[in-house]
Amino acid sequence: VHLDPAIRSAWSGVRIKVTNRKTGASTTYDVPLGSPTKLGSSGLTLTADSFVPDFVMGADGITSRSPNPKNTAAHVVISEKGKPDFKGWLFGTMPDIHPFPHDLYEVTLDSGIPAKK
């Protein structure tokens, strides 16, 4: 991921939404970048490595077209005891692209969290 330092420093974390597929109940969690965060009583722990406000993939890899949250994405690691880690991208505007595969919980990117100035 190649982000301009000004874009990288503009975001402190991500807001993640966890939905129980059986009950439809949803809860959002604020996850600081680089900090493993337990997602309530789901048994899942999520670490967001990076947040890209306007995701694009080109010849030079992944970057952001602009500092504005137009095509949001977060690279995450989701852990659950006894199961292999999920490492991949969650896309805010396209949550069905490469979703976290889980029978009970849907985990989606709600938004980025701007850094405090």
Image (cartoon, rainbow, N blue to C red):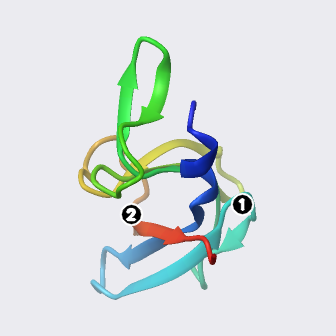
- The x, y position of residue 55, in whole percent, is 37, 40
Work out whether residue 103 can be spotted: yes
Q: Residue 81: which numbered mark, if any?
A: 1
- Between 116 and 71, the residue placed more toward the observer is 116
Q: Amino acid at mark 2?
A: Thr
Answer with left or right where residue 72 lies relative to residue 28.
left
Under mark 1, the amino acid is: Lys
Residue at x 59%, y 66% (from the top left corner)? 13
| Camera-nearest residue between 63 and 110 | 63
Residue 113 is situated, as x and y percent measured from the top left of the image, at 52, 71
Q: Label 2 crowding class (10 Å Cα cut-off): few <14, some 14-19, many 20+?
A: many
> Which mark, by number, is residue 15?
none
Outermost residue to the right = 35
Do callouts 2 and 1 mark residues in contact (Cβ within 8 Å)? Answer: no
The residue under the point 38% across, 63% down is 108
The quarter of the rendered structure image containing the N terminus is top right
Q: CA distance from mark 2 to mark 1?
A: 20 Å
Q: Residue at x 63, y 77 (%)?
A: 116
CA neighbours of label 1 inside 10 A, class few (<14), some (14 to 19), many (20+): few
User: Relative to 100, does residue 18 appear above or below in the rendering?
Assistant: below
**Position of 29 relative to 53 (above/below):** below
Report x, y in % for residue 41.
60, 84
The extreme top residue here reads 59
Residue 31 position by quadrant: bottom right
Look at the numbered disc 1 and give the secondary structure of its residue.
loop
| Pair 2/1: label in front | 2
Kind of element beneath mark 2:
strand
> Left or right: where does residue 78 sit relative to residue 105?
right
**Residue 108's mark?**
2
